[in-house]
Image: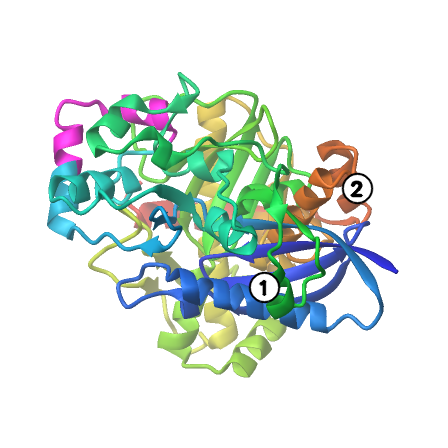
Amino acid sequence: MVDLLMGIDVGSTNTRCAVYSLDAGLVAISVCSSREALTEDGDVDGDLLFGAVLRVCRETLGQLECPFHLHGIAVACVGTRHMLVDRDSRQIFLRPGHEAVIEAFGRFMEDRDPTDYFNTTGYPPLSGFPGFQLAAAARYGSGARVDALLSVGDYVNLRLTGVRSREYSTACSMALWDYETGDWWADIVRFAGVDRGVLGTPGDSAAVVGSVLSSVCEEAGIPEGTVVYTGGHDFLCACVAGNCGDGFLNMCGTYELVVSFQSEPFRKNAGDMTHCYVDRHVMPGRFSLQYESAGAGQTEVLRKNFFRASDAEWDACFAEMNASAYAHSGGGTMFIPNDRGEFFPSERPFGKIIGLCGGSDRTALLAAMVESLTYKARLMLESQQEALGIAADRVTMLGGGSKSPRWAQIRADVFGVPVVVPKISEATALGAALLAGIGASVYGGFKDAMARAALQGITVYEPDREAAGRYSELYGMYLEELGM
């Protein structure tokens, strides 16, 4: 009998289910595109989402060839996405219209200081947060049916168990939480015209939600009696798997994050708050400060719109980049990504590439993109170090980009400090599985769970002095292109 833990990761690009041994080793995994669960309007369709979750669970467990005991399940998800349900827990779609939402946002912010908004919620004032959608819907009489606002993870838990849950890290990521009072922000709740009960009562990660419903067990192949535990915000679950309770983290995925960790919410001075956020960690008593930009997802745009390469061709391009000693020391080609403004809209749908020449083949262009994304990460790292008044002596790297040795080495050379890559598989799913293990008392708490993951080992990429010096020159050119 093999002892296992399951982590479900509902990300912005992919939804995956993975099962792990108790020492954090990957045993089986299944992945599907998260786009399968989106409506034409870009909302998450609950039935499609849960159907995808059932499928990846069934496929993952179907790979197991020996008897097993599943100690628990936890779900990690994108924090800022929300889902609404009625009294019967059926999904509701509120579409009050973009103009109505913008109007509600304008009314709320009319006499409000953006810095005060940030210091209250940990997020910059953006019209896309659910409070303004609810306010716009209430004004036009379409919000009365809403009985609960849930994160995507909370919704999956509801469908798995029939029990409503609310977890702190995702609850706080919707810009409705007041860090000063430790409760839902009274101003936005009153403005949105919702009952506090709609928002629920958040609790810590690794708490019991309930047992998986028999009907779900039968459809997904999950053993009867398996318990679901609260997970959390995807990148914060990954932090648990990567032993990132302190120091600096570079999460290199669809979105690029540079993160640090504190014992209390960070209060930011007035200035550019476009991509700066504060989140409550899945670890009790911890908070994160992160800077975000459009990240590795832009490589997909390069593949589809510039190279028109198949998956196999793209994998070969990455393999060639990793195998070569190529470093873009010539300074000819540089990619300037589009990542400004609310959720990164711009007149430029992609960005721009400068310095193209006859020798700029696919491998060179891919490396130029990886380098330029790293310049943006360095800018976020420097901004964060300045805000905190501390210097990074190393950076832990997680996410899809960390699977590329060349990508990690470029990070070390551009950052000028060692980059540490934990030898773990699918950090976010593993973090969720570890939370399930903590809840099931398989581990003696976060410290024990993180120590188990650490047994998988690390790879350390030391900066090359010569390459680091050249990259510093190119970084200066990058800043000039940005007008900084």
Q: Is residue 213 left or right of residue 27?
A: left
Residue 102 picture location, percent across and down: 15, 43
Residue 215's tag is 1
Mark 1, residues whose alpha carbon is within 10 Å: few (<14), some, or many (≥20)?
A: few
- Ranked by sequence position, the earlier of labels 1 and 2 is 1
Question: Magenta stretch: dominant SS?
Answer: helix
Residue 227's tag is none
Residue 406 sits in which quadrant? Answer: bottom right
Residue 442's tag is 2
| Magenta region, residue range | 105-122
Viewer-proximal residue among 483 and 318: 318
Residue shown at the point (16%, 50%) measured from the top left:
96
Q: Amino acid at mark 1?
A: Ser
Residue shown at the point (11%, 44%) measured from the top left:
140
Tell whether position 44 is magenta: no
The quarter in which the N terminus is drawn is bottom right
